[in-house]
Image (spheres, grey):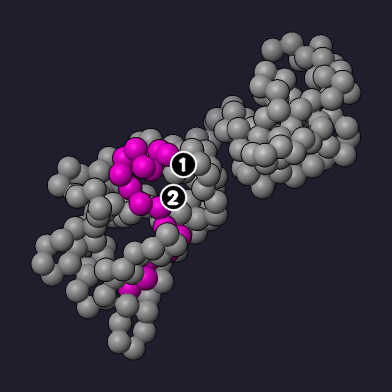
């Protein structure tokens, strides 16, 4: 086995994948001919999806700490890294099974994790989400986009596009400091939020 920050590599001939399930769609155990077990966790979807999977994962006690791997799609941030570290699981972008003639690369598809059909949060309109973003920023001035994604339960790309629109409409102002880009609400954004609250006081 060879591991680095981006990939975890196995020699194909000695490993069996798929025969050892965990009862979880997001995890699998691979086992070699000597009986060594590696716990694999797959992290698709948004940052929120990845956090929820990590929070709910159940790792068999017999799996050694150094033999726990999470393969992720898209992006991870410092919160995901801290959570993975707290359960002693290594984050990588891909798995590679080596053979003399070929290699097999395993990556996680970047699809959205399915939510319950009747989830009220899944039915939010664009205006509802703008309101949630403004409320999140006003309650926590100079907020990073990562925190907005968490608090508003948004897809990272969609959140980025919506914030760009809100910047163009002068609802938000972008501030750059030593830790990166942060956002604050403008007077126009606060007025817009107050109007939304009057229309829907909930």
Lateral position of residue 121 relative to residue 80, left or right:
right
Snapshot quadrant of residue 143: top right
Residue 112 in view of the camera: yes
Q: Which mark is residue 43?
A: 2
Q: Are marks 1 and 2 in contact (CB under 8 Å)?
A: yes
Q: CA distance from mark 1 to mark 2?
A: 10 Å
Q: Nearer the viewer, residue 155 or 183?
A: 183
Snapshot quadrant of residue 17: bottom left
Question: At 82% from the left edge and 15% from the top edge, which residue is drawn?
Answer: 194
Q: Check residue 43 for magenta coloring.
A: no
Is 118 placed above or below 201 here?
below
Q: Secondary structure at mark 2?
A: strand
Question: At 30% from the left edge and 87% from the top edge, which residue is drawn?
Answer: 100
Q: Which residue is mark 1?
A: 80
Q: Which mark is residue 118?
A: none
Residue 83, position in %: x, y? 40, 38
| Of pointers 1 and 2, the one earlier in the residue sequence | 2
Q: Nearer the viewer, residue 55 or 116?
A: 55
Question: At 89% from the left edge and 35% from the top edge, which residue is drawn?
Answer: 169
Of badges 1 and 2, nearer the viewer stands 1
Q: Residue furthest front?
A: 178
Lateral position of residue 184 relative to residue 118, left or right:
right
Lateral position of residue 85 relative to residue 39, left or right:
right
Residue 189, position in %: x, y? 84, 24
Q: Residue furthest left?
A: 34
Q: Check residue 94 for magenta coloring.
A: yes
In this picture, which residue range is highlighted in magenta? 82-97
Q: Nearer the viewer, residue 123 or 198?
A: 198
Lateral position of residue 3 relative to residue 121, left or right:
left
Residue 130, position in %: x, y? 75, 29
């Amino acid at each position: 086995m060879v591991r680095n920050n981006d990939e975890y590599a196995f020699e194909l001939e000695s490993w069996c994948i798929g025969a050892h399930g965990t009862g979880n769609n997001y995890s699998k155990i691979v086992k070699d001919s000597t009986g060594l077990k590696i716990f694999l966790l797959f992290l698709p979807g948004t940052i929120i999806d990845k956090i929820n999977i990590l929070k709910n994962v159940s790792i068999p006690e017999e799996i050694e700490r150094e033999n726990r791997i999470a393969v992720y799609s898209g992006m991870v941030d410092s919160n995901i890294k801290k959570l993975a570290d707290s359960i002693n699981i290594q984050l990588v972008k891909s798995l590679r099974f080596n053979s003399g003639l070929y290699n097999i690369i395993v990556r996680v598809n970047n699809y959205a994790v399915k939510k319950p059909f009747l989830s009220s949060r899944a039915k939010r309109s664009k205006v509802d989400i703008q309101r949630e973003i403004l409320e999140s920023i006003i309650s926590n001035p100079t907020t990073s986009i990562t925190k907005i994604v968490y608090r508003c339960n948004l897809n990272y790309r969609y959140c980025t596009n919506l914030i760009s629109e809100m910047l163009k409409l002068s609802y938000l102002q972008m501030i750059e400091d030593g830790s990166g880009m942060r956002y604050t609400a403008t007077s126009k954004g606060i007025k817009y939020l107050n109007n939304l609250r009057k229309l829907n006081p909930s």
